[in-house]
Every structure is written in C-alpha cells, then in structure tokens.
Image: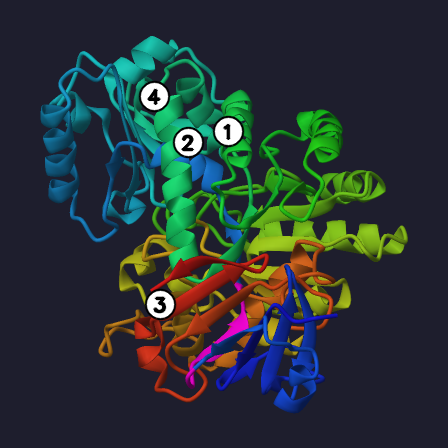
C-alpha cells in the first residue's frame, strides 16, 4: 500500500468509538488505508504522496443526509418557493408577483407555505382565484402533506362535490357548505388527483435543479443522501431525472433511494416487486435502491398525524394508513425480499405500527433488516424503550426542534412533548438525522440541525423559545453520530461509510473550527472548508 494523500496537523474525529481521535489519515485512491498516529502513517508515504496540512481544522466523516427527497425537490422547487415565516399576505403577494412575472406559464406550482397560517379547515381556493382564475395553481405546504389549489385545478382534475375522498379522514379534500372542494387538499392520494392530471414540471429544469442542489449539498459537507421517495404518480419522471443525473456524473453524493412511496396498503406487493427490480439496476455504492418507504400518517401542522388524543380545535381523530396488524404483515414481506423499511410516523398511534412491524420482523428472524421510524415526532412514553428493544432507528430533523407557540392551538399539551430524542437514545435506539429536504423549512445544513439538537432552540436567535422538555437535548457527539455512522447503519452501508476507519471510503468533511469545543450557539456559523467524496474533492471554500 502507498498513500496518495496524507491528512495531518488537525483534529480528526473518526466517529469510531474504539479510537475516536487520530493524528493522521492516509488514503489510497478512494479508500482509507491508515488511521492513527503520524509516524505510522508516514511509513506508507513516499515522495509522490500529497501531504494535506489541516492547519488545526476539524476533519470528520462526511455528513449523510439520512432523510431527504432530492429527486422530488428538483420538481417542487422549480417555481414559487415560500419562506416559512411569511404571513398569509406575504404568501399571496409573492404568488401574485410570480404570476405577473411569468404570464406565459400554463400552470403555477410552489412549495413551502406554513400550514399553521390557517385553521383546521385549511386554505381557501378563493384567495388564489383572485390572483389567477383561468390557469391551474397548486401549492404544497411546508410539510408536503397538504396542498392549496385554485378552482381551475379542481375543474381540470374533474374534482367536484360528487368526487369521493381517496381515504376519508386521512387523504381528503376540505369541503364548503355545499360539499364542493374548498381549496385544501390533504395527503398524497388527494394531491395525486391533481398532480397526475396537470403537468406542472419541465424535465430539463428538473435535472438542472437536481445538479445544483447536489452542488449545494457538497458545500454543506454532505457526501451521501438517503432519498426517501417520490409521489407514485411521478414514478416515470423520477427515473428519467435520476438516470439523467447519474449518466452525467454530476451527482456529488452517494445516492440511496426507495423510488416511490406506499400510500395505499393495496400496492405493497407491487411496490416491493418494483423495488426488487430497480435494485438490479441500482446496486453499487454510488447509486443504490434498498428501501420500502411507507407514509403511515400525515403531519401535525396539517392535522393529519395519527395521535392518540383528539385535536383540540375540533375534536377530530386520525387513523394511520396501516394498523399494527397490516404493518406487521407488510414488514415481514419487505424483510423477506431483503429490503430495508422506512415508515413515516409522526404521531404516537402511527409509531405503534412501526413497533408492531419491527417486532414481527425480528421475531421472524430478520435481524439485519434496517427499520426506520421517519421523523419520530411524538412517541408514547411507554413505547420509547421498544425502539431500542426492536432495533428501530429513530430518524428526526434537528431544524424542527424549536419552541413554536403557534402550534399550541393545534396540539395542546402535545406541542411540548415532541422529539424526545435523548430518551430514545438512552433507551438504546440509534438517532439518525436528516433534513427532509425540500420541506426542511429552516435549512438542510447538517450543522444547523446539530446545533438545534443540542439546544432545542432556533439557531441564530438566542432569545427564541426552547422546545420542551428541555432535558431532551442531545450532545453534539450524539448529533454528529446521527449524521454519520447511524445514517450509514440506516442505509445498510455502515461497513463502508459513516466513520473514518481502514477499508472504508474516503468520504470526509473538513470544518474551520472544532464544533466540540465552541459555544453551541456558534455551531451553525462554522465554515465548511472542504468536502471529499470517494477520495475526490467535491467542494472547497
């Protein structure tokens, strides 16, 4: 072995608990060949070895975004992008501005309005009709689990007062007094009835946006992305965009995906069959398909999360897509097909389905199947230890961990009992962090999430409210593990990425300052100096 590169003279955090800090790392090609003291590394060097002087900087494994939607993001970010802090008046003004600036567009689309701007009945179509009544307009909320449509969209999609809701109580249309769709479109199967009949997207723009988003990820220190799915009605477009980007060689992260969501128990067998076939094509360490993604409930903001208490505003309750029995059966099917499983579960009732699924999978002997509870926002206290017992990975998003009094009216006391990540970790679960990009709201940068996991307060706002319970703050180390080795475990790639160890890929991020030794409130300000993926620099400041 001969080192092509030698990294020295910095703080090197390996995320390997047996040897957490190292003086030197040697790389040959795209693999790590030595981790340890400098003297040992120099034995592998010759006059052709590039000596990389870190000059006191912090080097770590590259960040892995453990839950994002890069293909979907390239579609939904192609037109109007809302700021989560905009008022309703600002949302409407910016929609009008976009329409005025793009008079030749056939349709208008956007993402990101704050769902809590509206009451439990959601946004109204009349507000959009006043801006544009002769072309379809459709905007997704910040969580992506609800939409806002104008009358033309309902007309073109053929949705009337006589159109049944796809799944009453979970996937539905809010109605006016006469039963006509009022403008509020809740959950994927309802959204699909509009988005599958009206073309809002341009293929060339989608590919260019996906490449730009990948470059932005590299500037954030990200070397791998876990793509957690696309709407099933855009499956063809999903593969077209993914193939174009892969063939171009311009995607700067490892890509592990699941293609399209399961939003109907009836399609489980079909989805598993398609994933197994896709795995034949995407099965290397740069592009891989190995996740079955299930959307089991909605979001708190859209009042579609399956929680055990009625929503305070109107006393409504929501049932999950899969009850515990169906979830258990589905999990065993997926494990038998050698797939990993990721179930979106925001509410505690939905989380119980994840637990039932994991229990069934483990009892069937599939111990190596990676099972992730996406978001893990509200887990019943008695269920927290079961995540560790059944090896359920607790996925979450750090930039969601902040006090938000505006949600008190939606959730009541539950608003101060969410994201109990420290308890999940202490109970034996692995915390895996992701952005949920493009619905990340306050930024997909891992450093922002790491800071907010450790503070439970909005970054850059020292006087902002802290999310209760305060004692659920994680350590910086735990948050870093959430963006590295734990995400590698989730992706079933912990043997090759996620830590700096001999034999693993040379995926690194180099930071200007040591985030373990600075005030927590400064972590989001730390500059990324360089990102290296597969032994090659993908970003340099």
Mark toward the start of the polypeptide (1 vs 2): 2
Foreground tag (3 vs 1) = 1
* Residue bearing mark 1: 244
Mark toward the start of the polypeptide (1 vs 4): 4
Q: Is residue 475 above or below residue 144?
A: below
Q: Residues within 10 Å of mark 1 (few under 14, many from 20)?
A: some
* Residue bearing mark 2: 207
Q: Are marks 1 and 4 in contact (CB under 8 Å)?
A: no
Foreground tag (3 vs 2) = 2
Q: In the image, what residue occupies the spot 23% across and 30% down?
A: 124
* Residue bearing mark 4: 200
Q: Are marks 1 and 2 in contact (CB under 8 Å)?
A: yes
CA–CA distance between discs 3 and 1?
38 Å
Q: Tell me residue 46's x, y (percent).
A: 64, 76
Q: Tell me residue 159's x, y (percent).
A: 38, 13
CA–CA distance between discs 1 and 2?
7 Å
Q: Quadrant of the C terminus?
A: bottom left
């Amino acid at each position: 072995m001969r080192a092509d590169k030698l990294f020295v003279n910095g703080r090197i955090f390996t995320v390997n608990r047996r040897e957490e800090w190292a003086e030197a790392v040697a790389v040959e090609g795209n693999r790590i060949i030595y981790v340890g003291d400098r003297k040992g590394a120099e034995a592998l060097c010759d006059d052709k070895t590039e000596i990389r002087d870190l000059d006191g900087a912090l080097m770590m494994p590259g960040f892995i975004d453990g839950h994002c939607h890069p293909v979907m993001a390239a579609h939904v970010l192609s037109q109007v992008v809302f700021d989560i802090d905009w008022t309703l008046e600002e949302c409407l003004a910016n929609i009008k501005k976009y329409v005025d600036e793009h008079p030749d567009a056939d349709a208008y689309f956007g993402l990101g309005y704050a769902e809590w701007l509206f009451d439990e009945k959601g946004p109204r179509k009349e507000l959009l009709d006043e801006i544009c009544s002769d072309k379809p307009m459709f905007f997704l909320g910040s969580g992506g689990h609800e939409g806002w449509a104008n009358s033309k969209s309902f007309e073109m999609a053929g949705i009337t007062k006589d159109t049944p809701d796809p799944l009453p109580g979970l996937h539905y249309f809010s109605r006016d007094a006469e039963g006509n769709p009022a403008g509020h479109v809740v959950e994927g199967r309802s959204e699909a009835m509009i988005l599958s009949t009206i073309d809002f997207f341009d293929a060339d723009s989608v590919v260019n946006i996906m490449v730009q988003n990948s470059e932005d990820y590299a500037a954030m220190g990200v070397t791998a992305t876990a793509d957690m799915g696309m709407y099933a009605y855009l499956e063809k477009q999903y593969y077209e965009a993914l193939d174009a980007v892969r063939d171009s060689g311009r995607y700067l992260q490892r890509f592990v995906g699941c293609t399209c969501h399961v939003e109907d128990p009836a399609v489980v067998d079909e989805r598993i069959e398609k994933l197994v076939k896709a795995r034949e094509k995407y099965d290397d360490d740069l592009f891989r398909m190995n996740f079955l993604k299930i959307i089991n409930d909605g979001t708190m903001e859209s009042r579609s999360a399956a929680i055990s208490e009625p929503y305070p505003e109107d006393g409504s309750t929501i049932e999950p897509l899969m009850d515990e029995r169906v979830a258990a059966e589905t999990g065993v099917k997926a494990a038998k097909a050698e797939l990993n499983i990721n179930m979106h579960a925001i509410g505690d009732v939905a989380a119980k389905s994840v637990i039932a699924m994991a229990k069934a999978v483990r009892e069937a002997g599939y111990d190596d199947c990676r099972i992730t509870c996406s978001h893990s926002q509200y887990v019943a206290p008695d269920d927290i230890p079961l995540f560790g017992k059944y090896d359920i990975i607790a996925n979450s998003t750090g930039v969601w961990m902040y006090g938000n009094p505006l949600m008190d009216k939606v959730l009541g006391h539950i608003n101060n009992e969410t994201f109990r990540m420290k308890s999940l970790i202490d109970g034996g679960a692995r915390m895996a962090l992701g952005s949920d990009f493009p619905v990340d709201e306050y930024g997909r940068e891992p450093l922002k999430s790491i800071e907010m996991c450790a503070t439970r307060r909005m970054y850059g706002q020292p006087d902002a409210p802290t999310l209760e319970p305060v004692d659920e703050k994680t350590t910086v180390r735990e948050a870093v593990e959430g963006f590295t080795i734990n995400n590698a475990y989730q992706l079933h790639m912990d043997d090759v990425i996620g830590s700096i160890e001999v034999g693993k890929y040379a995926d690194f991020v180099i930071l200007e300052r040591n985030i373990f030794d600075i005030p927590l409130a400064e972590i989001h300000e730390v500059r990324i100096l360089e990102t290296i993926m597969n032994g090659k620099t993908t970003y340099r400041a």
